Image: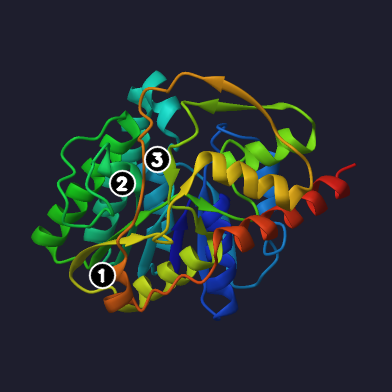
Amino acid sequence: MYLVTGAAGFIGSHLVEKLLEKGEKVIGLDNFDPFYAKEIKEKNLSGISDHPGFEFIQGDIRNTDELQRIFSSSKIETIVHLAAKAGVRPSIKNPLEYTDVNVRGTMNLLEMSRHNNVKKFIFASTSAIYGANRKLPFQEDDNVDHPISPYAATKKACELLCYTYHHLFGIPIFCLRFFTVYGPRQRPDMAIHYFTKLIVNNMKIPVFGDGTSRRDYTYIDDIISGVMNAVDRCKGFEIYNLGESKTIELRELIRILEQAIGQKAAIEHHPNQPGDVPATYADISRARKYLEYNPSFDVSEGVSRFVDWYLRMTSSNV
């Protein structure tokens, strides 16, 4: 039995679908955090809500009573912990809640794992943990002691807790550092989704800085493949980068979006934002070797697939 936290979110809903396709039984836990509309998350689960192998529970990872009920009623063997307060910039405005959800919530799940003989624990970390490291590409052994946002700091704290629980209690734990995941159902605040909406509606795109910031954009199917392989191979304690291992400048991403949408973007320039990093770039040699992780979606193909999904979604809502 799997417990997937954050199951109604972008990555979580895709992962649950893949697990169910494999014949696994899954409990999905999500508190419908108001960071974006509950209706979007409910729609993410609409295709699997009646699946006989799936049980959805609306609940909070900070609620230990709720967690106790789940673990006492079901034999959870694998946890894929995706739930978190997301976003770099919002974490600067509300660091206490980010710490409460991300750190305390993760602690609760580690405690449940300790006392309920959980066999595998997969923790969703982030490329933001590398901060403003100038050495590229980022490697798992790089120093990550200088996060530049509360969000990144909470994820670093959770990785440390994961190691501690592995060391003390022998729980097999893999921490997966995701690099800017995109694709159908992507969070509406993320650049590809947000920019697509603005271009389609003839609104100006806010560009922070000069447009030369670079990101390693990773298509959702590649991320799910990496997570599934990590579950299969989870032994000991390891940290893996899951990215595309290519970088795209922001201004080039906008050009790719314009091409996929068939419309020109209007740009509105703004100063750089606190907490934003100049570049993310994953060295995935470790994941290739040990997880057989082989991302296959070029950003142009991935963006085209996202735009197709977005246009179908918005036309069906008219």
Residue ID at (25%, 68%) = 117
Residue ID at (63%, 55%) = 303
Q: Nearer the viewer, residue 147 or 209?
A: 209
Q: Amino acid at mark 1?
A: Arg
Cα distance between the residues tagged 2 and 1: 25 Å
Side (left or right) of 51 relative to 278: right
Q: Nearer the viewer, residue 137 or 179?
A: 137
Residue 197 seen from this side: yes
Residue ID at (22%, 41%) = 157
Q: Say which residue label 2 marks.
A: 106
Label 2 near label 3: C-beta < 8 Å? no
Label 3 near label 1: C-beta < 8 Å? no
Query: Of helix, strand and loop, which one carries label 2?
Result: helix
Give x and y (percent) for residue 231.
36, 72
Q: Say which residue label 1 marks.
A: 286
Q: Amino acid at mark 2?
A: Thr
Side (left or right) of 304 relative to 167: right
Side (left or right) of 248 relative to 192: left
Q: Say which residue label 3 marks.
A: 63
Dot 3, crowdedness within 10 Å: few (<14), some or many (≥20)?
A: few
Say which mark, if any, is on residue 173.
none
User: Which residue of the protein is positioned furthest toward the right in this rendering?
Assistant: 318
- Name the front one of labels 2 and 1: 1
Give x and y (percent) for residue 259.
72, 50
| Disc on the earlier residue, 2 or 1 | 2
Question: In this rendering, is residue 251 above or below 48?
Answer: above
User: Which residue of the protein is positioned furthest toward the left in this rendering?
Assistant: 168
| Disc on the earlier residue, 3 or 2 | 3
Dot 2, crowdedness within 10 Å: few (<14), some or many (≥20)?
A: many
